[in-house]
């Protein structure tokens, strides 16, 4: 099958979409399919078969991302000869617009995966363009309404929308999406996860050998709610062997500096380790170096890093969120902590108590760790590809009947 992927992000950019796309493309090609990927020009990208780059500029809200022109005469002509069977877009923006245009023009199925909860990123406008916000009188509600409109409009252009989690399917229906929505999570290539001795992994990352390490992996952004984890660490600071390892970064250095300042204010700066961005094999080493994966984001569409942690055998303690609950089962492979906006302190105490419980109860830890590894097997990218290909084939058959 010839498949067209259109995305505004790809490796070497470090985010869940880029990771998921790389593994999906790689494993589909191993199964004998052609995956043609259209992306913005990304500096330092390594050459890869069937990857095409459009002219791009830096995205003003997130400096690590690029935004491409929404059309290319060169690749429009190229696509005339390519004869794709389906087009699958991974963004509603520039490359998504290009992909939708090409699918309609060629009368082939258009599928879209809703990877990012756009309503939760409206605050970037305030952070980067405060004067424009003030001048145009853009309220938070107005910004979220625009994000909902974009989501609804684009998804309703498609033949089928893929939601990575139950949470996102429900939200898209509430947004007014009328097209069929299939829940298909992003998968992992489990072959990348080879158990590493914890001491060896810590030596490679220069981490304390004789310690308990709580791990967070993700972009350092307000939407990830990392301040909550710092407050949890504040509750745990009387346990001298507990450290918080934060893997990830943000081109806006104010974010990391603010987190470091907060850690200093709470007198836990010597117990919080910031690694910055790491290459993927180093991130895997970080999983195997750690004891518990902690996650505080409530804005995920799936939370691929949580799935990676389970694959490495880490019990997960996370704030309760429907996206995470698709694969973290409370008291089975982790704990889900209710987040009470009316009483955040109670959530912090519940979270920190579960950390202590896991670290002090060896049998419970062992059970959750084994269950974590077993549960992750259901999310291999090869199994996910089968569901994806079934969807593609069904839509192709429908189009063939319709266009006969």
Image (spheres, grey):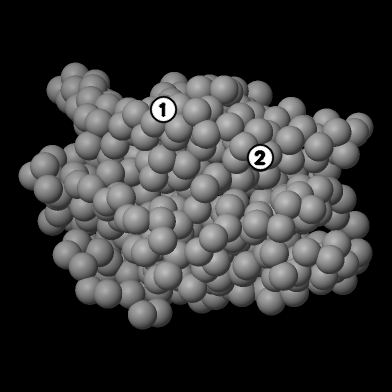
Determine whether 244 is above or below 265 in the image. above
Secondary structure found at label 2: helix
* Residue 279 placement (x, y as % from top left): 40, 68
Label at residue 225: none
**In the image, residue 19 above or below residue 152:** below
In terms of depth relative to the viewer, which is nearer, 24 or 347?
347
Q: Quadrant of the N terminus?
A: top left
Towards the viewer: 71 or 164 = 164
387 left or right of 256 in image: left
List the residue tagged with mark 2: 355
Residue 105 % position (x, y): 31, 45
The residue sitting at 37% across, 34% down in the picture is: 373
What residue is drawn where x is 11% and y is 42%?
A: 31
Residue that appears at 82% across and 70% down: 264
Report helix, strand or loop for mark 1.
Answer: helix
Looking at the image, the residue that sits furthest to the left is 32
| Nearer the observer, 370 or 309 | 370
- Is the residue 9 above or below the residue 59 in the image? above
**Mark 2 → mark 1, Cα distance in angstroms:** 17 Å
Residue 144 in picture, x, y percent from top left: 75, 44
- Looking at the rendered image, the quarter that the C terminus falls into is top left
Q: Is residue 95 left or right of residue 61?
A: left
Residue 319 lies left or right of residue 113; in this view the side is right
Residue density around tag 2, few if under 14, some if 14–19, many if 20 or more, within 10 Å: many
How far across and how far down the image is residue 362, in percent?
52, 34
Q: Mark 1 points at which residue?
A: 371
């Amino acid at each position: 099958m010839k498949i067209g992927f259109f995305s505004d992000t790809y490796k070497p950019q470090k985010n869940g979409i880029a990771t998921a796309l790389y593994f999906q493309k790689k494993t589909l090609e191993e199964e004998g399919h052609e995956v043609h990927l259209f992306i913005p020009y990304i500096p330092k990208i390594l050459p890869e078969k069937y990857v095409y780059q459009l002219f791009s500029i830096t995205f003003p809200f997130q400096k690590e991302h690029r935004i491409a022109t929404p059309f290319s005469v060169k690749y429009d002509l190229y696509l005339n000869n390519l004869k794709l069977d389906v087009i699958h877009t991974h963004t509603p923006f520039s490359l998504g617009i290009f992909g939708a245009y090409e699918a309609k023009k060629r009368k082939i199925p258009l599928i879209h995966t809703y990877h990012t909860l756009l309503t939760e990123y409206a605050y970037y406008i305030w952070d980067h363009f405060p004067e424009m916000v003030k001048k145009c009188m853009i309220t938070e509600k107005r910004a979220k309404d625009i994000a909902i409109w974009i989501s609804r409009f684009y998804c309703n252009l498609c033949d089928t929308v893929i939601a990575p989690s139950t949470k996102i399917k429900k939200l898209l229906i509430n947004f007014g999406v009328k097209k069929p929505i299939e829940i298909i999570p992003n998968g992992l290539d489990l072959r990348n996860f080879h158990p590493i001795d914890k001491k060896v992994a810590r030596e490679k990352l220069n981490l304390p050998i004789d310690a308990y390490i709580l791990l967070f992996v993700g972009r350092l952004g307000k939407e990830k709610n990392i301040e909550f984890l710092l407050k949890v660490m504040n509750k745990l600071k009387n346990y001298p062997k507990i450290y918080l390892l934060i893997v990830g970064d943000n081109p806006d250095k104010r974010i990391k500096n603010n987190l470091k300042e907060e850690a200093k204010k709470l007198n836990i700066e010597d117990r919080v380790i910031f690694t910055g961005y790491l290459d993927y094999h180093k991130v895997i080493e970080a999983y195997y170096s750690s004891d518990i994966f902690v996650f505080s984001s409530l804005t995920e569409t799936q939370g691929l890093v949580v799935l990676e942690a389970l694959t490495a055998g880490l019990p997960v303690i996370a704030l309760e969120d429907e996206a995470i609950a698709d694969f973290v089962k409370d008291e089975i492979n982790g704990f889900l902590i209710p987040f009470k906006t009316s009483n955040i302190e109670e959530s912090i105490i519940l979270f920190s108590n579960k950390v202590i419980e896991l670290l002090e109860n060896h049998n419970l830890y062992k059970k959750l760790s084994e269950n974590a590894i077993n549960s992750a097997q259901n999310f291999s990218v090869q199994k996910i590809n089968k569901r994806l290909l079934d969807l593609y084939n069904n839509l192709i058959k429908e189009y063939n009947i319709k266009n006969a």
